Structures are given as structure tokens and as C-alpha cells.
């Protein structure tokens, strides 16, 4: 039976004290929650919790639905429950310098390794010259030189006697042997005197010169093995003297990081190569020595022993949760910086830079689909990463041969990143239709419900709607 309602019956009253705030200004910055999005919330929580390849999330929803804000908050909450991701460093590759070595360590230990290797460089640069200058080392060095120098001196004396018998004086000059024709008075013969000789005299002179050149060649064949043996014994003496010092410094690094490096065998191999490189470069450490014949100086040598701390998670409380709102190639994948020196572009392992995909290792990375596909090169590289889970850091222009110099080829990184891709329903189904493999990488669909009154709510659009989109694309193609 119909009846008229009174005003109190049409009024909803609530207790202001039960609201939890004095006025709405206190609600600024507060998350509204997943109001009306229970299905999307369940899908998001499921996808973020699954730790299996291929379970990346595609978030469907229209702008203003709260999809980005709610998903970023869910990512941060999920990341806070995970352990902090490891640090990532790049090290010099002693065997293949153009292929730097990647190494992962427990969070915060990248800084420790960097400090340890800085101290290592300081110690060896100071202590190796001191060790080689000790009295015992110098005495043994003099003994080796004296024992072998006798053979060298004897061979040289025989050569000078032979030269004198042919009227030539012999001397050493800048590591070379130089001979001069002498006259009867023991003076260097001038060119005019030579030209004044008869043809027969000049022929005799030429034969004598040829004999001397042949004798010099035999002399060099005789002394080179002696010189090499002297160099070998002196090098072995230095190595024997310095080896305990280098082993002590390397063992200190190994002990400080024992059990804290993710890839222990790789780190052990690096330390072995580090010690070997120092012992093979002892000439660079000699006091008063600035540069080797091959151009390697002390600064260049010690530069090999630095650490490029690519990702530092020392301050992290959990796994990373990153949103890249401007995913250009370099910001997403990183790159390699170059520097012009004498008109030539140069680089080294210290100039490798991380992108957000590397920083998100062990956690989550949010991207907006339309931002990524705007750059075909970035979209193609992201698809390659989805297929194999490995990232090769490179300079974008290097892929097209635009650099004049040889670029580095850092060790590919195996990354574990859960991608959260934001897009509209139309984006999702068009991409799925264009690339059937896409769905295999994004097995979790977080579908934000459309506002009431829309023709369809969740799931795949109505068939008529799909036909309309295909017809519309065909119409554009014809025009």
C-alpha cells in the first residue's frame, strides 16, 4: 500500500566522529582503495605473487580508472614483502677487455667491493716498488746480470775486434749498433776521402762492410738468447719477491666477501686473473717508471682494477618497484657512454650505465604500452627480453653501425623482472591479434571494470565491437 514518507525517513544520518577525519583536506594523498574493482584486485594480487616466467601483468582500463595508481601501490606492497635485490657490478675482463664481466653480490656489498679494490690498487702501487727496491732483491738482481753479462761482453768484444780488422769503429747508440769507417790515423773517414778512392778500393771497402754486417747479424743471433734468459731470470726474481704480497692482498678481498657473492666461481676466477695481471705488469710498478713500450702506464693499469657499481641496493628495504613514465631506449635498457679523445670516440667498462629494467631486477617494473610502442627500437628489444629473459646492454646507435669505434659488448644479464603493462582494452586485443605470442608473456590480465552503462563490463569485447574495429582498420587501410 502506498504511503507518504516523512522527511526524517528520507534522511541518512551519520556520526562525523566515525568518519576518521575532521575535513576532506586530510584525505589528500590517501589511496581510495579498490572500490568496485574486486576482480581486478584479486587478479593483481595473484599476478604479483606468482614467481614464474611468463606471468607478467597486463592491466586493462580506461584513463581515470585508477589503474596506474592502484597497481603501483600494489607493486610497492608486494615488493616490501620480498628481500632486497642483489647489487650488480661490472668488472674488467682481463682475457677479453671488450667484454666486461657482470657480477652480483648481496645488497650493499657492491660498495664494499669497490672500496676493497681501491685499497688493493693503493697498496700494490705503494708496496711493490718498495719490495723490488729491497737490498736482497737488488743483490740477487746484480748477481743474475753479472753471471750473464760476461757472455754478452765477450761476444761484443769479439765483434769490435772483427770490426777493427776491417777498419771500422763500432758503438752502441739508442739500442742500435752503429759502425764508422776509420782512416789510417784512427779518425772517422770523411765522405770526400771515400769518393777519392779508386773503384777497386771502394769495392774492397764495400766487401769489408758487407762482412761486418754479416758478423753483426751472427752477433745478434748469439746474444739475443742470453738477453732473453737474463730478462726471464730477472722477471722470475721480481715475481718471486712480489707474489706473497699480491696473494696477501687478494686473499684479504676474498675473505671479506666469502659467501656473499651470488656467483662465487666467477668471482674466484676474477681474483685469480687480477693477481696474474699484477704479476705480469711488474715493470709498470718500478719506481721512476712511467710508461711501458706498449703505452701502458701505472694509471692505465690501476684503472683496470676499478668497480663499476651499476645497481646499488644498499639502502633498499625490499625488492624494487619502479614506474618508468618515459621509457625511451636508454632509460629502459641502459647504454654505454663514449668520450672523444684526439678525435676518436673511446669507452671502457666504467662507462656502462643501467636502465630501469636492470634496476628492477628481483622486483617489478610498470610501463605504459603506448609509451613503449612509440619507439620501435625499444619495443623490439623489450620483446627480445621477454623471449629469453636476458638483456644485452648496448648503445642504441651501435645497433645501426653509427659509431666509428668498436663498442663494448658487456656480458648479457639474466634478469628476473615482473612487468606490469598498462593499456586500454583496445590496445590489449589489437596487440594480441597482431602478435599471438604476446599473450604467452602476459598470462595475468587485470581488468578494471568499466563504468556502469557501458555496453560490456569485463572479459573479451562483444563480437560486434571487434568486427567494428576490424572494419575501421580496413577503412583506414583503403584510404
Image (cartoon, rainbow, N blue to C red):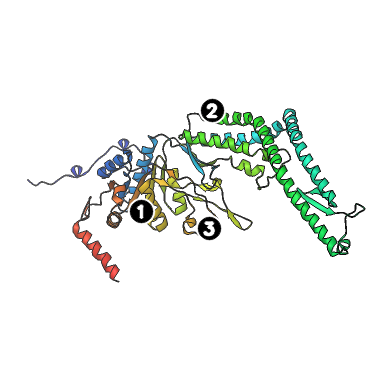
**Which residue sits furthest left?**
1
- What residue did someone put label 1 on? 369
* Mark 1 element type: helix
Cβ–Cβ under 8 Å for marks 2 and 3: no
**Which residue sits furthest front?**
200
Counting residues from the start of the chain, the first of labels 2 and 3 encountered is 2
Mark 1 or mark 2, whichever is nearer to me: 2
Quadrant of residue 37 within the rendered picture: top left
Quadrant of residue 49 within the rendered picture: top left
Disc 1 from disc 2: Cα separation:
47 Å
Which residue is rendered at x = 75% and y = 49% of the image? 216
Left or right, 38 with reference to 169: left
Which residue is rendered at x = 37% and y = 56% of the image? 373
Counting residues from the start of the chain, the first of labels 1 and 3 encountered is 1
- What residue did someone put label 3 on? 403
Name the quadrant of the N terminus.
top left
x then y, percent, for residue 404: 55, 58
Mark 1 or mark 3, whichever is nearer to me: 3
- Of residue 73 and residue 350, the one placed in the foreground of this image is 350
Which residue is rendered at x = 65% and y = 30% of the image? 240
- What residue did someone put label 2 on? 255
* Mark 2 element type: helix
* Mark 3 element type: loop
Quadrant of residue 251 within the rendered picture: top right
- 460 vs 11: above or below: below
Q: Residues within 10 Å of mark 3 (few under 14, many from 20)?
A: some
x then y, percent, for residue 259: 47, 29
Q: Residues within 10 Å of mark 2 (few under 14, many from 20)?
A: few
Disc 1 from disc 3: Cα separation:
30 Å
- Of residue 144 and residue 54, the one placed in the foreground of this image is 144
Residue 314 seen in this snapshot: no
Amino acid at each position: 500500500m502506498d504511503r507518504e514518507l516523512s522527511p526524517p525517513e528520507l534522511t541518512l544520518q551519520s556520526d562525523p566522529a566515525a568518519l576518521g577525519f575532521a575535513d576532506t583536506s586530510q584525505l589528500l594523498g590517501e589511496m581510495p582503495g579498490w572500490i568496485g574493482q574486486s576482480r581486478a584486485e584479486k587478479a593483481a594480487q595473484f599476478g604479483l605473487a606468482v614467481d614464474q616466467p611468463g606471468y607478467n601483468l597486463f592491466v586493462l582500463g580506461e584513463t581515470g580508472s585508477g589503474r596506474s595508481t592502484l597497481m603501483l601501490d600494489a607493486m610497492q606492497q608486494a615488493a616490501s614483502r620480498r628481500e632486497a635485490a642483489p647489487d650488480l657490478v661490472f668488472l674488467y675482463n682481463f682475457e677479453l677487455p671488450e667484454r666486461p664481466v657482470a657480477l652480483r653480490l648481496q645488497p650493499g656489498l657492491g660498495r664494499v667491493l669497490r672500496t676493497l679494490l681501491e685499497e688493493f690498487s693503493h697498496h700494490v702501487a705503494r708496496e711493490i716498488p718498495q719490495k723490488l727496491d729491497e737490498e736482497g732483491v737488488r743483490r740477487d738482481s746484480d748477481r743474475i746480470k753479472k753471471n750473464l753479462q760476461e757472455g754478452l761482453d765477450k761476444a761484443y768484444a769479439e765483434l769490435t775486434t772483427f770490426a777493427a780488422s776491417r777498419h771500422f769503429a763500432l758503438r752502441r747508440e739508442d739500442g742500435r749498433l752503429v759502425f764508422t769507417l776509420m782512416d789510417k790515423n784512427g779518425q772517422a773517414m770523411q765522405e770526400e776521402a771515400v769518393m777519392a778512392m779508386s773503384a777497386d778500393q771502394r769495392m774492397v771497402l764495400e766487401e769489408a762492410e758487407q762482412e761486418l754486417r754479416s758478423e753483426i747479424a751472427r752477433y745478434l743471433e748469439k746474444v739475443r738468447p742470453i738477453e732473453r734468459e737474463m730478462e726471464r731470470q730477472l722477471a722470475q726474481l721480481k715475481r718471486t719477491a712480489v707474489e706473497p704480497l699480491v696473494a696477501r692482498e687478494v686473499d684479504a678481498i676474498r675473505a671479506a666477501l666469502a659467501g656473499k657473492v651470488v656467483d662465487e666461481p666467477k668471482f674466484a676466477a676474477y681474483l685469480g686473473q687480477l693477481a696474474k695481471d699484477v704479476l705480469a705488469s711488474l715493470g709498470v710498478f718500478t719506481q721512476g717508471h712511467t710508461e711501458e713500450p706498449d703505452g701502458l702506464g701505472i694509471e692505465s693499469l690501476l684503472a683496470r682494477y676499478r668497480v663499476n657499481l651499476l645497481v646499488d641496493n644498499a639502502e633498499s628495504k625490499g625488492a624494487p618497484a619502479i614506474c618508468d613514465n618515459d621509457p625511451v631506449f636508454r632509460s629502459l635498457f641502459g647504454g654505454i657512454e663514449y668520450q672523444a679523445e684526439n678525435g676518436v670516440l673511446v669507452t671502457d667498462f666504467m662507462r656502462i650505465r643501467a636502465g630501469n629494467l636492470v634496476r628492477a631486477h628481483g622486483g617489478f617494473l610498470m610501463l605504459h604500452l603506448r609509451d613503449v610502442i612509440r619507439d620501435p627500437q625499444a619495443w623490439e628489444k623489450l620483446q627480445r627480453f621477454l623471449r629469453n629473459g636476458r638483456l644485452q646492454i648496448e648503445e642504441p646507435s651501435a645497433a645501426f653501425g653509427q659509431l666509428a669505434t668498436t663498442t663494448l659488448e658487456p656480458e648479457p644479464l639474466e634478469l628476473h623482472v615482473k612487468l606490469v603493462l598498462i593499456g586500454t582494452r583496445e590496445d590489449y586485443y589489437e596487440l594480441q591479434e597482431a602478435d599471438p605470442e604476446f599473450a604467452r608473456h602476459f598470462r595475468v590480465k587485470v581488468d578494471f571494470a568499466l563504468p556502469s552503462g557501458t555496453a560490456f563490463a569485463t572479459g573479451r569485447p562483444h563480437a560486434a565491437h571487434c568486427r567494428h574495429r576490424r572494419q575501421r582498420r580496413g577503412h583506414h587501410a583503403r584510404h
